[in-house]
Image (spheres, rainbow, N blue to C red):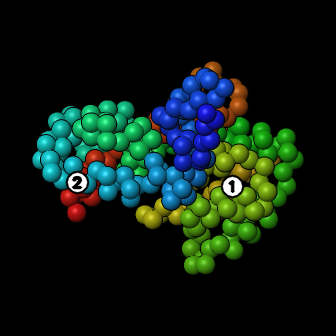
Amino acid sequence: PTIHYQAEDLYVGSCVEFLKHKFVLIDADEYALRYMEKHCDEFPHANISLIMTKLCGPASAHIDAVRKAFVEADTSKCGRLPYRQFKELVQGLSRGLLNEHETLTLGRHYGERKRPPLLSLLRITHGDLSRASYAGLEGLRAALASCDASGHGLISPQQVRNTCTDVGLPLSSQLVDGTIMNCESDAEGNIKYEQFVQFLDWKNMKLQDKADQLSMAPAGSTGSWTGFGENRETVTSVDYTALLADLTK
């Protein structure tokens, strides 16, 4: 019989069959992961509320053992674990209760993201803007400023993304996100949008002069930006203490 897949059937770790060949989905890019989390009512494996509901019962019944396992794994006693270690521990403790995508969603929710090297990022960003002969920075600046209701020079990353889409900025979502991640932000995560615009000034920002101030590109790196590599690694570490606190509420 013909199998008809729905959007919710496609997630990291799922197995699908096409033309009698089975495929395992092993990864998803940042755009896809964020889209699923934003529309989590359609994608249950990216719904942190459903995941926590699934975990709370079993975890609360054995919370002392769960806490002990995390604390023993945290040899640095910093309250955080590297994502891979967190993933292995969660999957072991949950005994199959969570699939790979649900574990990834949990890690992303409580995790700290990796910031891409700025100099490497800007070299590629400026190259793309130069090839497009982009001349819309002032329009972008004005559009971003219109989102700044408080006049403090800070707006949310989502407002920046939406504005970039609205004005037709010729950059991939990965490049926009990488630039956002390198901007200064306040305690609530709002970024300085003027700095974002300055980073995109491919005509006037001399990267060679900034090399001693910016993170250097990895040795031998030359080509195109491919996003953040394996998305599990964009989460560098996970705050397990925050997870434990939420499990015991």
Residue 182 seen in the current view: no
Task: Label 1: state its secondary structure.
Answer: helix
Q: Single out the residue that lies furthest toward the right.
A: 133
Q: Where is residue 228 shown, x and y percent of the image?
A: 57, 37
The label on residue 217 is: none
Whether 55 is drawn above or below 87: the answer is below
In the rendered image, which quarter contains the C terminus? Answer: bottom left
Which residue sits at x=18%, y=43%? 66
Q: Where is residue 170 shown, x and y percent of the image?
A: 78, 49
Task: Label 2: state its secondary structure.
Answer: helix
The label on residue 57 is: 2
Sequence-wise first label, 1 or 2: 2
The label on residue 198 is: 1
Asked where in the image residue 102 lies, by quadrant, the reply is: top left
Which residue sits at x=39%, y=39%? 99
Q: Where is residue 138 shown, x and y percent of the image?
A: 79, 63
Which residue sits at x=46%, y=52%? 44
Q: Where is residue 224 shown, x and y percent of the image?
A: 71, 31
Mark 1 or 2, closer to the camera: 2
Asked where in the image residue 247 lies, by quadrant, the reply is: bottom left
In the rendered image, which quarter contains the N terminus? Answer: top right
